Amino acid sequence: MLRQIEGSRAVADAVAMCRPEVICAYPITPQTHIVEALGAKVKAGQLRPCEFLNVESEFAAMSVAIGASAAGARAYTATASQGLLYMSEAVYNAAGLGLPIVMTVANRAIGAPINIWNDHSDAMSQRDAGWIQLYAETSQEALDLHIQAFRIAEDLSVPVMVCMDGFLLTHAYERADIPSPDQVDNFLPGYEPRQVLDPAAPVSIGAMVGPEAFTEVRYLAHARQSQALTLIPEVVAEFTKTFGRDSGGLVRGYRLEDADTVVVALGSVLGTIKDTVDELRGDGMRIGILGISTFRPFPSAAVREALGSDGRVKRLVVLERALATGVGGIVSADLRMALAGGGSGRAAEPVMSTVIAGLGGRAITRMSLRTMLAEAVAGALEPLSFLDLNKGLIEREFIRARRTRRSGPVAENMLRDQGLTARIG
Amino acid sequence: MPYQSIKFIQTGSLAVGGRLLAEDQRSVQSGAQRSNSLTLGHRACQGCGEALGARIALDACQRATGGKTIAVNATGCLEVFSTPYPETSWQLPWLHSLFGNAPAVAAGVAAALRAKSRDDVRVVGQGGDGGTVDIGFACLSGMFERNDDVLYICYDNEAYMNTGVQRSGATPYAARTATTEPVGPEPGNKFGQGKNVPMIAMAHEIPYVATATVSDLRDLEYKVERAMEFRGARYLHVLVPCPLGWGSAPESTIEVARLATQTGLFPVFEAEDGEVVSATPIRHRTGVRDYLRIQRRYAHLFKPAERTEMIDRIQRGADRNITRFGLLPADDIDAELATVGAGRAEEITS
Amino acid sequence: MFQVRIHGRGGQGVVTAAELLSVAGFTEDRHTQAFPSFGSERMGAPVVSFCRISDEPIRTHEPVAEPDALIIQDLTLLHQPGLLDGLAADGYMLVNSTREFGELGLDEYAARMAAERLLVVPATQLALEHMGRPMPGAPLLGGFAALTGQVRLESVVAAIRERFSGAIAEGNAAAAEAAYRFVDDERRTAGHHAGVQEG
């Protein structure tokens, strides 16, 4: 049923239809609306059987999910930002134990300075935790990806993180097609664990493994996650058949056919980039887009296939909503590895530029994208640049730092330079 | 059933096997049906109090649940020595996740069982003192506050033994550890008497809190079985001497634990809904010197010269416990007062 | 695509107003998108929300920089820097005020604009009158429907009834209807004064 609905509520509806048996909730902006909505459903008896636990931290949230999943229950939680970091030890543990937990990450920046707004720093920090990571472009896709996530997670016994841009998707009212419970039931069978804590057949889960087998355990985790590269397209095909729409997948191309310049990005910014690319195409620029829907495992072969091997693509612009401090791009590094993996016989690799954009909630506007992409097409884009960087603000701080030893806290200095103390909005 | 008074034959050890008792009064361990939850082949040290405590506690839990217990274990000695790859000593479903999250993981298992309407299967969370009173403390408190249906057992050996005997929040005053060396003007641990988690648990007003030691295994069994009569969050704090960390003889584990109770340093009691309902009286009142002297972690209190002030402080702590929990009958206190001399009466009776 | 920016203060229902507007548009089978400016949710702090209404699917997720209409929920924000940024000369502005537009001190600005598109509505008064609470969101949406014709009054009322229930729904709906009539009258008068044909 088509509804105009907040992204968080759309996701809560989808998660509820997946019939989780244990949900753990700990509040952190901008994830709260999702678990609030789920809590209300459980309390109203609309979601049964389901245990809704208000835990005392994100670390506990993931830990409760681990216990529940190991006891054979379908487990779900949601978090963001500092919360994801606070649970990080348990995030790795869930993957190491092979427990198919599904978690929403309402992407938000990481402090300090504390910042509640969107970027991808949180999920990117956990990219090697052993979880599958899916990124949503729209509320609809966020909803759809959660239904797919349980399927993928339980099929592989690997946890799945569904990443949706905080505020931009979680708090936006958009049109979404909410499936019926029957459709979801047809698509998602009951959870059949590969390992379960059962007094009738006792097993020890989480035993210590030393150097004699640890590499093999890790290799198997890698192999299992890599199976997702085959599984995800199959799940999407089945999803399309059941729900009548195509959603998710490994990568999504847009106007790539004759593109000599390709923008690579993840998440909700893809929509803004599409509008921009349509405009620039009108100006005669042959630009296309490659959206990465599955970031972990990294779909190297799908990326190579989408970009073609004929040397048509001359330039790649990787728009990243996170920064590897001291390095630059995060997605860029994986892309380089993917392109290098094509073997010999490939035409020259495209020139790659990394653009760091939208950190801590800075809006990524069509206007800025237009200017940046025109530069890229003209071959004038630096290998690493920051969209809409306020150079004056930085220069002033450099001067301050040169002139005085005790130059003070950087964030506060900059706010003062801007004439703001605590601007909201 | 006719009443049969229990006569303790082996008065020196209190370790009554139970074969002299009627069938239904015998200990879990004396029965052929015992589940051997933690079975042979594990890699604990000689004389390990924790291995003993865990074995007794889980077997009692298995008897109480008809063999339907799931155990969740924090990282620590117990976890490491029981599951050396590729072996396991556990004969019940067992899950180890992390150091600081066992209470939450256990709560998750309990939630799953509730969702699946499996109220016949019960959950035990367990860890050492580090995993309980320090790094797992927030998860433990959260589990208490939600009153999750979990029995959490802390095997307290008063330091981080798995990592090589470092100080924990349960390390008592003056004890030597690798991070509280017996040097300087205040040798050993300079803080209080360790974080008192049983009292903190009681402050949460959970249904059942109890303490026990491996010196009285019948009492330990009883408390586990009693705990399993309640639903909701329950906490059992078991003192388990560590020969390695305490510097006590492996064969003295039971004796050291018993002295901890007979000095009053470790009060053995039960509490329901936040109120103490019973305390195990001291049978042979012992001064703390006898307890301290047999542990090398306290050697600096006696050599090169006795540190009387520090020992007195430890004695005052023991005396306070005796008063607070009523560990001696009132006339015994009077008798005791006569032996320790003037100047101590106020502290003991107030 | 028609883009709306709503300015108000935390607690006044700024975000809810944008959401209701998007639902109103949706009930007319149009594509809409509403989102807040994502601040900390403190009572009294300036808050901005956005709504887009389009016949095509909306893909962009950038904030509205060049609104076709501004709704000002709180008069004390009127002279805040940046408030009027991006509003085109043929844009609409609806201000929650009991005073006339001419008394708001925006003469210089208004001179460049179409007079019949710059209107006031006493939304807080109407809200107090019809539901006893100073929540100007619903009446401003009723006024918006009259001012811009982007959504029908019935759609606004339907959105209100979907979101609220009982007396609150009825009070909001009545306030929205009253505001619609008020603005409709104002628009006709202003249009008449400016010599603009109605239609």
Image (tube, rainbow, N blue to C red):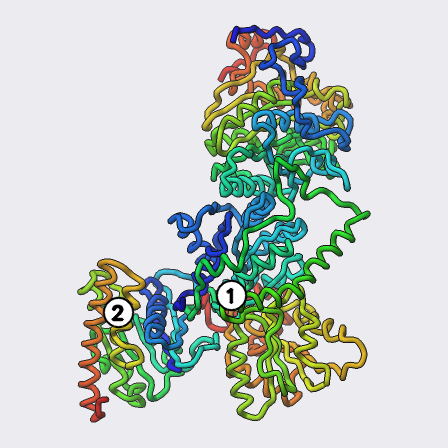
Residue at 39%, 60% (x, y): give it: C42
Residue A354: x, y in percent?
65, 76
Label for residue A242?
1
| Frontmost residue, A324 versus B219 | B219
Q: Of A30 and A343, which appears nearest the observer?
A: A343
User: Against B155, is C157 above or below?
Assistant: below
Residue at point 72% right, 25% down? B298
Out of C60 and B310, give the one closest to the viewer.
C60
Chain letter of the residue carrying label 1: A
Among the 4 quarters of the image, the one containing residue B126: top right
> Which label sits on residue A296?
none
Numbered label attached to residue C157: 2
Residue A399 at x, y percent in the picture: 61, 74
Question: In the displayed structure, does residue B57 sit left or right of residue B274?
Answer: right
Q: Residue at x 65, y 37 (%)?
A: A201
Along the horizontal axis of the image, is B191 left or right of C56?
right
Q: Is residue A347 above or below residue B285?
A: below
Distance in Å between CA atoms under marks 1 and 2: 35 Å
Q: Is residue A413 visible?
A: no
Q: Quadrant of the N terminus of chain A?
A: bottom left
